[in-house]
């Protein structure tokens, strides 16, 4: 069976006509299968949503209890047949609950990666390689300039700066879902046993991760206090909060941003990052290539990001490649308007 009979792009997103189901649709649809809880992939208003239990919990925490007409949990490795297509979810290693979608019919298997990474992460299960005929991948960091060091290395860099400037607070901008919790968990692994202070916009998701058994350390809400109280402290906030008066409550703050984009110096300067930390929840250039090879797929579709660059590399490897240029994906940052 041709892959396009199983999944093909439509304005709403990737569509399976046999199951009348969309993967990560960008507008409300009758039936959606959601790969993970970031706002560019998980939207409210669908008639029914299939996802991992963790992703459904994240959607509920962010959007309220009525984010969809109905929900259904699908565990990693569990198969469900819809319209003659067998669907299953497999860990993507991106954030808590993130999943790849495998769709199989007529002897052809198509795998949608969603967003993913190959680096180890103490806050979520590792990426699972799923052999397939067609691999549909993201390409957020599909340029040779993007090589991500280990998160452990970057956290050590943060701790070295804290030791060097004990009179200053270190304020780290990180995405409220996934990246922030990963930084917290890596701090704990590195031996940080002091409180980790967080912006109010992060509290609900921190609690959710903790309820799922993820060790994040002694996490505390930033409270009104004399500036000197936060000397030597590590504070996490949404990246957008770094550009607001909220930061002024801290003593001579060392501003930092944890993101794969910090590999680009101009982006670091643009976001006011005195201490850029290259910590990303996406695969870098080398891991994108490695993953494509590992799947054994002969055909590669690329949803968003640097799709043309990755398609060119695939062509050089003798792989059939197609850049889909799907619209509506790639912006995970949440507004920082929540209570501080």
Image (cartoon, rainbow, N blue to C red):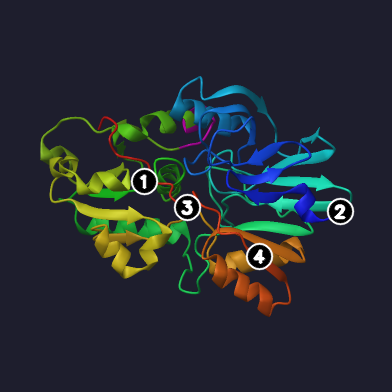
Which marked residue is nearer to the observer: mark 3 or mark 1?
Answer: 3
Q: Decide which of tag 1 and tag 2 comes sooner along the chain.
A: 2
The alpha-carbon separation of the residues under discs 3 and 4 comes to 18 Å
Which marked residue is nearer to the observer: mark 1 or mark 2?
Answer: 2
The residue that disc 1 covers is 192
The residue that disc 4 covers is 322
Q: Position of residue 276 (x, y in %)?
A: 32, 61
Which marked residue is nearer to the observer: mark 4 or mark 1?
Answer: 4
Residue at 76%, 53% (x, y): give it. 4
The alpha-carbon separation of the residues under discs 1 and 2 comes to 53 Å
Residue at 67%, 56% (x, y): give it. 136
Q: Decide which of tag 2 and tag 4 comes sooner along the chain.
A: 2
Q: Position of residue 252 (x, y in %)?
A: 13, 51
Element class at badge 4: strand
Which marked residue is nearer to the observer: mark 3 or mark 2?
Answer: 2
| Label at residue 1 | 2
Q: Decide which of tag 3 and tag 4 comes sooner along the chain.
A: 4
Measured along the vertical axis of the image, is residue 339 above or below residue 272? above
Crowding at label 3, few (<14), some or many (≥20) Cα neighbours within 10 Å? some
Q: Which residues are magenta?
A: 209-215
- Left or right, 257 with reference to 287: left
Crowding at label 2, few (<14), some or many (≥20) Cα neighbours within 10 Å? few
Answer with the quarter of the image where residue 308 lies.
Answer: bottom right
| Label at residue 35 | none
């Amino acid at each position: 069976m041709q892959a396009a009979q199983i999944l093909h792009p439509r304005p709403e997103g990737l569509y399976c006509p046999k199951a009348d189901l969309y993967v990560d649709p960008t507008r409300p649809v009758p039936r959606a299968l959601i790969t993970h809880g970031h706002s560019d992939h998980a939207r409210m208003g669908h008639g029914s949503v299939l996802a991992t239990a963790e992703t459904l919990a994240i959607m509920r925490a962010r959007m309220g209890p009525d984010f969809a007409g109905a929900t259904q949990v699908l565990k990693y490795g569990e198969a469900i047949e819809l319209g003659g297509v067998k669907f299953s979810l497999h860990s993507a290693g991106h954030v808590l609950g993130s999943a790849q979608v495998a769709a199989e019919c007529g002897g052809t298997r198509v795998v949608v990666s969603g967003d993913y990474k190959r680096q180890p992460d103490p806050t979520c299960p590792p990426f699972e390689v799923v052999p397939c005929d067609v691999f549909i991948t993201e390409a957020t960091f599909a340029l040779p300039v993007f090589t991500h060091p280990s998160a452990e290395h970057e956290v050590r860099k943060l701790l070295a700066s804290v030791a060097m400037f004990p009179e200053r607070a270190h304020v780290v901008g990180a995405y409220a879902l996934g990246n922030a919790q990963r930084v917290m968990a890596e701090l704990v692994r590195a031996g940080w046993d002091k409180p980790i202070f967080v912006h109010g916009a992060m509290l609900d998701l921190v609690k959710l991760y903790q309820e799922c058994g993820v060790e994040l350390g002694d996490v505390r809400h930033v409270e009104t206090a004399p500036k000197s109280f936060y000397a030597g402290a590590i504070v996490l906030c949404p990246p957008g909060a770094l550009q607001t008066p909220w930061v002024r409550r801290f003593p001579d703050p060392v501003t930092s941003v944890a993101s794969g984009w910090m590999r680009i110096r101009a982006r670091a300067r643009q976001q006011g990052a005195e201490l850029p930390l290259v910590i990303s929840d996406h695969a870098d250039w080398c891991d994108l290539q490695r993953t494509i090879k590992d799947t054994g797929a002969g055909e590669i579709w690329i949803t968003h990001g640097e799709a043309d660059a990755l398609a060119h590399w695939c062509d050089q490897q003798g792989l059939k490649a197609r850049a889909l240029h799907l619209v509506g994906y790639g912006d995970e940052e949440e507004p920082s308007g929540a209570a501080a």
